Structure formats: C-alpha cells, structure tokens
Amino acid sequence: MIKRLIVGFISIVVFMLVVAIGLDRWISWKTKDYIYDEVQALPHRQVGVVLGTAKYYRTGVINQYYLYRIQGAINAYNSGKVKYLLLSGDNALQSYNEPMTMRRDLMAAGIPSSDIVLDYAGFRTLDSIVRTRKVFDTNDFLIITQRFHCERALFIALHMGIQAQCFAVPSPKDILTVRVREIFARLGALNDLYILHRQPRFLGPLIPIPAVHHIPDDAQGYPAVTPEQVVALQHQLAAEKKAEKKAAEKTPPAVAPPAAAGK
C-alpha cells in the first residue's frame, strides 16, 4: 500500500514537471518571432520599455542583469531605434526606486532627461506591459530585457492584444538558478492571465508619450510661432506691464475743478 502511494506521488510529481516544462517551451516557441538579439536588426519604434530590476544584490554586489539592460537601452537609443525610454519598475519603498536609479545611470550616459519617462507602478511584468498600453498610450513598443524575460513579457502582450517586440540583451553566465525560477514565474503568469484575469494594481490617467498638445479649433495657423518666440513675447509683455505700472505710480492723481457758483 505504501509502495503504491509512493509510486503514485512520484508519478504525479513527474507529470507536473513535464507539464511545467512543456508550458515553458510553449511560451518560448510562441514568442520567438518577436525577439531580436542584435541592435542593428531592431525595428524602429517610438518607445523602448526598460523592465526594471535591482541594481545591487543584497550582498552589495552589482547586478549584471541590470547593467546589461541599461547598456541595451543606451544602445537602442543611440542607434536611433527608439526615441523615448520608458523606465518601468518598483517604487514600493523610499530606499528602493528602480525607475529613478535607471534614470540616473541613463542620464550619466548622455541620454537627455526629456527623452526619459518614468513608470513607478511597474511592480510586475504584467503591470509594466499593460500600463505601457493603457496609461502611456503606446501600443507598438520595444521591450528591453534578457531573452527569458522577453518571452514572458511578450506572451503577456500577445494575450492582451498588445503589439510589442523585444531586444534580448545578454545574460550573465550563471543563469541556471534564474532560469529555473523563470519556469515558476511563467506558471504564475499563465495563472494570472487565464484563471485570475488579473489587471495592473494601478492604472491612472492617460499620459501619452510624447504628450499630446490640444490645439483649439479657432487657433490661428499662420504665421507659425516657435516656442522660443512665445517665451520672448511673454517676457516683453511682462516688461511692458511693469513699465506701465511704474508710470501710473509716478503720475499724480487728477484734481477736479471747483464747481461754478450758483449751480
């Protein structure tokens, strides 16, 4: 009896492992056509989404996964493949802020702050992908992360009807433990998508990239005025208003003539 139970238990475990590995391979196969390994082969996209991770391990050693993602973002931007970088990560603690950390390193590499957008609510891969579409109004974008993470992120995007591609940056050599953990992460993603039908924890108002400027229907079209001319005009009007105020303060108030007698 005990032997039967042991054999049955082992059979169930083996079956579950085979199913888990099969689902893992299915996700890899389904997303393989949307992944690029070389920056030269990347399609041109307006937005590149850098999926966040910690810069340092708990031991204080720098995280190679983080370094490769930052370098991949720099390469994609400098090669002209993306115009804006959306940094999506966790900001749960004051002392732990993935988007701000990535922003500092990208700016140190020469990327202007005007081309960097921060998403502080990218708590999970699902949050990052769906928020890029629903909050930042971007449906066709480039994801930047390691290949194993690319596959899960793209699978989520495909399931949600989101168009995306992925730039697979290099991975450190000691990837075995992370890759095994990824199998369970993929099972969790399947559970979120097909059973729990989860959505991001936070959405919020629409923040298009780049921002959409609403122009009134009755606005004058020509002659065109550049932003620099608008600023100069504002300064000129402010100076004229200030001069008028000073002139009014110096002018004595008018005195009314005395009324005529008999009236």
Image: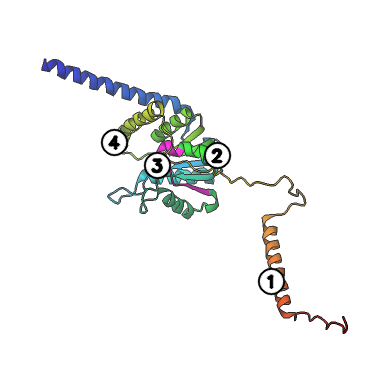
Q: How crowded is mark 4: few (under 14 residues within 10 Å), some or many (20 or more)?
A: few
Residue corresponding to mark 1: 242
Q: Which of marks 1 and 4 is nearer the N terminus?
A: 4
Residue corresponding to mark 3: 123
Q: Nearer the viewer, residue 55 or 132?
A: 132
Q: Classify residue 199 by image quadrant.
A: top left
Q: Which of marks 3 and 2 is nearer the N terminus?
A: 3
Amino acid type for the residue under numbered disc 3: Phe
Amino acid type for the residue under numbered disc 1: Lys
Residue corresponding to mark 4: 177
Q: How crowded is mark 1: few (under 14 residues within 10 Å), some or many (20 or more)?
A: few
Residue 15 visible? The answer is: yes
167 versus 161 height, above or below: below
Residue 117 highlighted magenta (yes or no): yes
Q: Classify residue 20 by image quadrant.
A: top left
Q: Which of marks 2 and 4 is nearer the N terminus?
A: 2
Q: Which residue lies furthest to the front in this view?
A: 262
Residue corresponding to mark 2: 137
Q: Earlier in the sequence, mark 3 or mark 4?
A: 3
Q: Which of 164 and 236 is in front in this view?
A: 236
Amino acid type for the residue under numbered disc 2: Asp
**Disc 2 to disc 1, how far (Cα)?**
43 Å
Q: Earlier in the sequence, mark 3 or mark 1?
A: 3
* Left or right of residue 212, residue 37 in this image: left
* Left or right of residue 194, residue 15 in this image: left
Q: Classify residue 241 by image quadrant.
A: bottom right
Q: Which of marks 2 and 1 is nearer the N terminus?
A: 2
- Residue at (32%, 33%) from the top-left corner? 179
**Disc 3 to disc 4, how far (Cα)?**
22 Å
Residue 112 visible? The answer is: no
Foreground mark, 2 or 4, reads 2
Q: What stretch is highlighted in magenta?
A: 116-128
